[in-house]
Amino acid sequence: MSVWKDGSFRMMAAAALATAVACSHPAPASAPAPEVAPPPAAPAAPPPNAVAGTFALQAVIQGRTIPAPPPQPRRPSRGRTVTAPLAAVLQLTPTPAAAPDPSAPSSTQLRAEVSLPGYTMPPRGRTTQAAAWWPGRGDSVTVRWVTPRNAAVSLRGTLRGDTLSGDVWYTLLDSGSEFQLGTWIAVRRRTGR
């Protein structure tokens, strides 16, 4: 018997069609996609005038505090004078650097002066070495100077009130290799008026 003659094919087709129609219900409405909030904007860099000032600097490099704590006062031997230990000082100004460091990662470079015994080499007759500084995202600040050994020392940190603090980094300029040397903190010196 032929499928066409007795109508069984038609019945199978009709049953299949009925099943498809009965089972085909409207697709569920897709849930609205949650709104994705844009990422928060990166905080603006601190204005140079807010950071500028003279700071008393102290670093701990490879377990050694720089500058060393002052020795206990004692009376000098007759005919000798007492010399004060070298001070560590950081001075940041809002003026552009006179000679920007072409190897620095920032094109915005402001004038700085730094004295960190053992890591700065001020010119004869001066107590500080020229450096550059720049504000970063949020409250971050970087101070950088180049040493005669074809390396750069960077103080990377954050500003909180009158205190800057962070890490000391040493960068080999030939290879770009960086090493963390230690930590630092600088407290703004307030001048009396």
Image (tube, grey):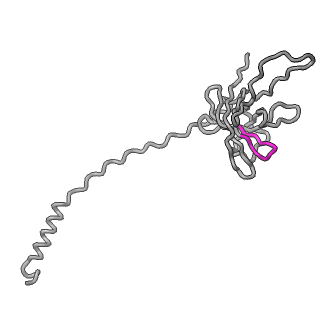
Residue 135 percent coordinates (x, y): 66, 37
Q: Is residue 119 above or below residue 4?
A: above
Residue sitting at the far right: 79
For the point 8% across and 82% down, the residue is 5
For the point 63% across and 31% down, the residue is 159
Q: From this viewpoint, is residue 117 visible?
A: yes
Q: Main secondary structure of the magenta part?
A: strand
For the point 73% across and 19% down, the residue is 191
> Which of these two is toward me, 108 or 123?
123
> Which of these two is toward me, 151 or 78?
78
> Which of these two is toward me, 184 or 19?
184
Residue 193 percent coordinates (x, y): 73, 16
Q: In this view, does 189 lie above or below 5?
A: above
Using the rendered view, name the quadrant where residue 9 is placed: bottom left
Residue 131 percent coordinates (x, y): 76, 38
Residue 110 percent coordinates (x, y): 73, 37
Left or right of residue 193, residue 21 in this image: left
Using the rendered view, name the quadrant where residue 94 is placed: top right
Q: Is residue 76 above or below residue 85?
A: above
Left or right of residue 128, residue 106 in this image: left
Residue range in magenta is 142-153
Q: From this viewpoint, is residue 134 visible?
A: no
Q: Is residue 19 above or below residue 183?
A: below
For the point 60% across and 39% down, the residue is 137
Residue 151 part of the magenta segment = yes
